[in-house]
Image (cartoon, rainbow, N blue to C red):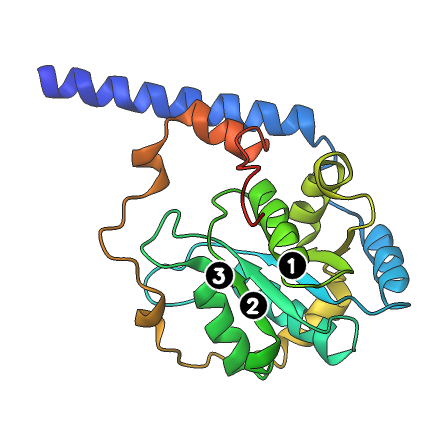
Amino acid sequence: MIKQVNLKTKNTIRLIEYVVGFSVLAILFPSCQFSQKASHKMFREASKQQFDMIVVPGIQFENENWGRVMKGRIYWAKYLYDKGIALNIMFSGSAVYSPYYEAEIMALYAEAIGIPKENIFTEIKAEHSTENIYYSYRKSLKLGFKTIALASDPFQTKMLKSFIRRRVDKEVKVIPFVIDTMKVIETTMTDPKIAFEKAFVPDFKPLKKRENFWQRLRGTMGKRLDKNAYN
C-alpha cells in the first residue's frame, strides 16, 4: 500500500513538473520557432560574412546512436562550414542525461562526416541551452576568435535569441535551419561509426538526480550561469 501511494505521489509530481514547465515555455516562447521566411532571411544575412566560430548546442546521446535532432544540427554545421560561412565549429554540451559528453560525441560525428579535426572545438561545461551559448562564447573569445554565431534548429535559436541579446553579446548572430535546405541535406546523410567510448563519463550522475525541477528550470532560463567560466 505504501509503495502504491509513493508511486502515485511521484507520478503526480512528474505531472505537475511537465504542466508547469510547458506553461512557462508557452509564456516565454509563444510562437515557438522561427518561420521558414525568417530562417531564410537570417541565413541570407549570415551568408554575407564569415564567422570565426559557429556554436552548436548539444543534445543527449543514447543507445549508442545519434538521434535525428543531433544529426540535423551536425549536418547544418557542416553545411555552414562547406559554404565558408563558418571557419570553425564549437560543439557545446556536458554529460547531462546520458553518460557521454554531448559535445565530444558531436565532434566525433562531425569529423566522421568531413569537417576537419583542426576546425572542431568542444565546450563540455554547459548543461542547459543558455549555458551552451554563454560558455561557448566566452571560450571562443579566450581562444582568440572574434566573430561568433549560434546555429541550431528553428525552435532553439528563437528560444535563445533574446537571451543572447541580453546576456551574451548583441553582435552574436543566430542561424536557424532553413527547412527546405535541410530536406536536401537529409538525402545525403550517412550514419558513420564513431569511437563513442572516448566521450564516456565514468561515475555519471544524470542532471535529474543532481538538481530538482526548479533548479533545472532556473538553469534553462540562464539564472545559474558561472560568470567566472573561461575567464
| Pointer 3 or 1: first along the chain | 3
Q: What's the amino acid at mark 3? A: Ala
Task: Identify the residue at horizontal 52%, vertical 27% (top origin).
Answer: 218
Number of residues whose C-alpha sits closer than 10 Å to that of mark 2, classed few (under 14), some (14–19) or many (20 or more): many
| Pointer 1 or 2: first along the chain | 2
* Residue topped by disc 2: 121
Q: What's the amino acid at mark 1? A: Ser
The picture quadrant where one finds residue 17 is top left
Given residues 96 and 122, the one toward you in this image is 122
Given residues 101 and 169, the one toward you in this image is 169
Residue 111: % across, % down: 53, 79
Q: How far apart are the two marked residues, 3 and 2, measured between alpha carbons?
A: 9 Å
Number of residues whose C-alpha sits closer than 10 Å to that of mark 1, classed few (under 14), some (14–19) or many (20 or more): many
| Front of the two marks 1 and 2 | 1
* Residue topped by disc 3: 103
Q: Is residue 228 left or right of residue 11?
A: right
Residue 160: % across, % down: 69, 42
- Circle 3/circle 2 CB separation < 8 Å: no
